[in-house]
Image: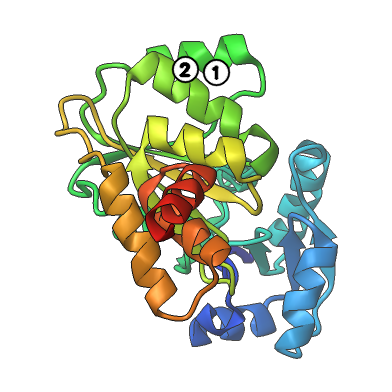
Amino acid sequence: MPGMLFLVGTPIGNLGDISPRAREVLSAADFIAAEDTRVSLKLLNHFEIKKPLVSYYEHNKYTSGEKILSRILNGETCALITDAGMPAISDPGTDIVSLCVKNGVEVNVVPGPCAAVSALAVSALPAGRFTFEGFLSISRKSRVAHLESLRNEQRTMIFYEAPHKLLKTLTDLLDVLGDRAVSISREMTKCHEQTLRTTLSGAVAYFTENRPRGEFVLVVAGAGEVPAETVSQEEGLALVMKYRGEGLSLGEAAQLASADTGISKNRLYRLALEHME
């Protein structure tokens, strides 16, 4: 009798977000297939789960997938996890699910954290209808073509992006889609979690002066949405002075106000200096 495949959602940052059922399934599985066994081993060790690990990622998914399928068909149960979040969501897990289904293997899911939905929830943008676009291509030609196809998309759009590509992607979003509201979340559930709600032009200005760090989720307003309200420099200055009143240094206050408004940190710093003279 064949075994089965479990898709197990794992924390996207805070280990406290793992569910009791996820721990139970990982502990009961015959083996665990993981995107990066080194990353997954840290998670499993934290919860004292000792199970054989099998590597399954983009560049070995065909050969490894066949081996995993063979073990399942021989009666073993496999738990598939990714480095963070839900397997098969912008992840090679899609292929092993398809392979198992084609071969009559039962596939079950253990829901868990998902960065895309979490970022959408805190974006303050319409969440009734949305489209998940995953990672954009590293090729600018392909990236722009992808964005051109979304020019008239009315649903809220969600993208994943790496820090070294963020500014280029924001610039292309602005060039192709025009200036519109965007919410940018990074390091979700971790100690340096941050969400910047601004416009695409404000985001370009902010990340031109502030080096992107961490993994990002971009939530972009659909076509026809009312543009994000532009924050005036006077309002930005008022925010700097508010933070100053809470005991922060001028630099720290300007940094926080810049994150809140999308106005350049240096511009806010200079405005504050002029105000205090």
**Up-down relation of residue 276 to residue 146 (above or below):** below
Between 93 and 42, the residue placed more toward the observer is 42
Q: Which mark is residue 46?
A: none
Occupied quadrant, residue 191: bottom right
Give me the residue at 34% from left, 70% from top.
242
| Image-based side of 129 in relation to 82, left or right | left
Residue 45, image x and y in percent? 79, 84
Residue 190, image x and y in percent? 58, 71
Q: Quadrant of the C terminus?
A: bottom left
Tell me the element at label 1.
Answer: helix
| Disc 2/disc 1 C-alpha distance (Å) | 5 Å
Q: Are marks 2 and 1 in contact (CB under 8 Å)?
A: yes
| Residue 145 in view here | yes
The residue that mark 1 highlights is 143
- For the residue marked with disc 1, what is the amino acid? Arg
| Image-based side of 71 in relation to 86, left or right | right
Between 38 and 99, the residue placed more toward the observer is 38
**Up-down relation of residue 153 to residue 255 (above or below):** above
Between 80 and 119, the residue placed more toward the observer is 119
For this orientation, the residue located farthest to the front is 277
Give me the residue at 43% from left, 72% from top.
244
How are the residues colored? rainbow
- For the residue marked with disc 2, what is the amino acid? His
Q: Which mark is residue 146?
A: 2
| Image-based side of 53 in relation to 132, left or right | right
Give me the residue at 26% from left, 23% from top.
153
Q: Quadrant of the N terminus?
A: bottom right
Tell me the element at label 2.
Answer: helix
Residue 112, image x and y in percent? 47, 69
